[in-house]
Image: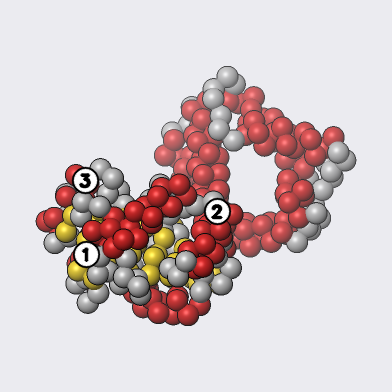
Amino acid sequence: MAKIAFLGTGLLGAAFAQAAAKRGDTVAAWNRSPYKAIALAPFGIAAAQTPADAVRGASRVHLVLKDDAVVDEVINAARAGLSADAILIDHTTTLPALTAQRSERLQAQGLRYLHCPVFMGPAAARSAQGSIMVAGSRALFDSVKTDLAAMTGRLEYMGERSDLAAANKLFGNAMILGVSAVMADVLTLAQASGVDPQNAIQLLGWLDLNAMVAGRGVNMANGNFVPSFELTMARKDVRLMLETAGDRPLAALPGIAARMDQLIAAGHGAKDACVLGIDAVQ
């Protein structure tokens, strides 16, 4: 099996490292807070004092870090120990523009780099579930495809464009956070209405969100706003929601109402409520 390194052993990085050790890889780990890497010793993972020590002799170096600045800092710190053929596999959620710059810069410097953000939590990482997206050199991806596939339930190669996985990661997280905000508002409405929160969440399970994406989402992307649920009627429903909530805090609905008011004032009230996305597709 391979000798690999994990730089960054927070919740996700530690889970990835544990799973790799369980698969039989020889794993070294480094974390800015040393105790987090030391805590992995029961899994047969060697804690390194520096990034350079962790990556020495490793064929793959997985980065699971906080942000762009930390990624750049840690890669620079690791360089002294990097093998010439080592592949940097960056799972960090980063800004697309900076990801593209980083990929171009590292390639020019002779380093092998793939951006591979994920949709998974620690439990999924330990059991090789969830999704990994990959952007960068096709040849480089092909060389590690089998290894990455062992880490996840779904592996998607996005293409040679180095910032494409970073952009799609933000798309997915926007949906996750947006749905979470709306669910929070649903629970606020349930509280205001004297309805058990579990019952309110059960109702949401009746709704087919995948069908909404395939229907209304595709219409939005195509700029098709032929009405099946007119914006003015949707705005009336949001008014009812706001009145029901009263002075309770809301995460998403006030912003939705404000955007609807802008669009109605601009003459879009008779279009479908998915006209909320009109400025994105014009």
Q: Residue at x 28, y 45 (%)?
A: 32
Q: Is residue 86 left or right of residue 231?
A: left
The answer to which of marks 1 and 3 sits earlier in the sequence is 1
Figure colour scheme: secondary structure
Which residue is denoted by mark 3 in the rendering? 34
Residue holding disc 2: 98
Q: Is residue 267 left or right of residue 50?
A: right
Residue type for callout 3: Pro
Quadrant where the N terminus is found in the figure = bottom left
Amino acid carrying mark 1 in the image: Val
Mark 1, residues whose alpha carbon is within 10 Å: few (<14), some, or many (≥20)?
many
Q: How many marks?
A: 3
**Callout 3: helix, strand or loop?**
helix
The quadrant of the image that shows the C terminus is bottom right
Task: Give the percent coordinates (x, y) of residue 248.
Answer: 54, 22
Give how far apart the Cα atoms at labels 1 and 3 are.
16 Å
**Which element type, helix, strand or loop, lies under badge 1?**
strand
Numbered disc 2: secondary structure: helix
Rendered residue at 38%/70% (across/down): 87
Residue at numbered disc 1: 27
Residue 78 visible in the picture? yes
Q: CA distance from mark 3 to mark 2?
A: 28 Å
For the residue marked with disc 2, what is the amino acid?
Leu
Q: CA distance from mark 2 to mark 1?
A: 29 Å
Q: Is residue 83 left or right of residue 42?
A: right
| Residue 196 vs residue 263, the one in the foreground | 263
Q: Position of residue 111 (x, y in %)?
A: 43, 68
In the image, 253 versus 140, the foreground residue is 140
